[in-house]
Amino acid sequence: MNAYIKDQIELFQEKNKNRGCLLVSCPDQPGIVAAISKFLFSFNANIIESSQYSTNPEGGTFFIRIEFECPNLMGKAKEMESQFAEIGKEFSMEWNLTHVYHVKKAAIFVSKELHCLLELLWEWQSGDLMADIALVISNHETAREVVEGLNIPFYYVPANKDIRGQAEAAQLKLLKEYEIDFVVLARYMQILSPTFVEENPNKIINIHHSFLPAFVGARPYERAFGRGVKLIGATSHYVTNDLDEGPIIEQDISRVDHQDNVDSLKKIGRRIERSVLARAVKWHIEDRIIVHQNKTIVF
């Protein structure tokens, strides 16, 4: 990691050392917000941001994200988790209490096309993507010079369907070695095995160069051109074992017309892909996403 990025992270951690985030989903019922507020008040915590949503006030599912400041949060963390576990049990909650000062470690996977990787690196360099990009893994050498120029470790791991098991074993070893929190597939053009996906549930973010569910799989721009579409788009989603059918995090589109050929569709599409993936990654590292069934709630 270069010195500038290290300083940026240290400043961020100092600024947010007492800031926490609580994500909750549970059956909707009276008293949830009151119980959470009373819990935070008992630790002298001040609510900075609160967003909530219910699928149906009568028998639906309730979701809430609360960001808060709490004096000496690091010293209180274990006790807070222990006490909130009782509230979670009472309301049948799925919950996650995180600490903003913990900067998540990311591994970026990429193949030959570098536009999404370059966008993430630019956001990271500017301080707008507050993550520790710990390493980049690729099945091509194309990105090496760019990545190593930023003092980020680069690993070339050949991968195709014939050696997938061998490649993924090497990749999983690296993820464990670097203590990675999540993976970004920045146009990594390989299908991941069920074993790999199951070891990283809702921790693998992909960018698909289509407005899903249209044009799942390979060569979506060619197929879109063949259909004469008037809108093209990109979709960022969590990876599951169903190809391009994981919970959608973010999407965007751009209008095109009969004058656009496949190459111009790709050029327009790359701009959309870059911004869509960057937003999805930011929301993930800021703990703004709750996965519910095969959908996401993004606060």
Image (cartoon, rainbow, N blue to C red):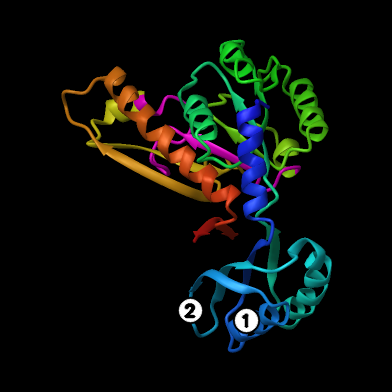
- x, y percent for residue 242: 59, 42
Compared across the picture, whether 129 is left or right of 229 comes to: right
Residue density around tag 2, few if under 14, some if 14–19, many if 20 or more, within 10 Å: few
Name the residue that disc number 1 marks.
37
Whole-angstrom CA distance, mark 2 to mark 1, is 22 Å
For the residue labelled by badge 2, is the local secondary structure a helix, a strand or a loop?
Answer: loop
Res 62 quadrant in image: bottom right
Q: Quadrant of the N terminus?
A: top right
Name the residue that disc number 2 marks.
56
Q: Which residues are magenta?
A: 199-221
In this picture, is 225 found above or below 131? above
Compared across the picture, whether 288 is left or right of 209 comes to: right
In this picture, is 175 found above or below 147? below
At label 1, the amino acid type is: Ser
Q: 126 or 62: nearer the eye? A: 126
Q: At x 58% / y 69%, what residue is drawn?
A: 66
At label 2, the amino acid type is: Asn
Compared across the picture, whether 231 is left or right of 15 comes to: left
Q: At x 59% / y 82%, what residue is drawn?
A: 33
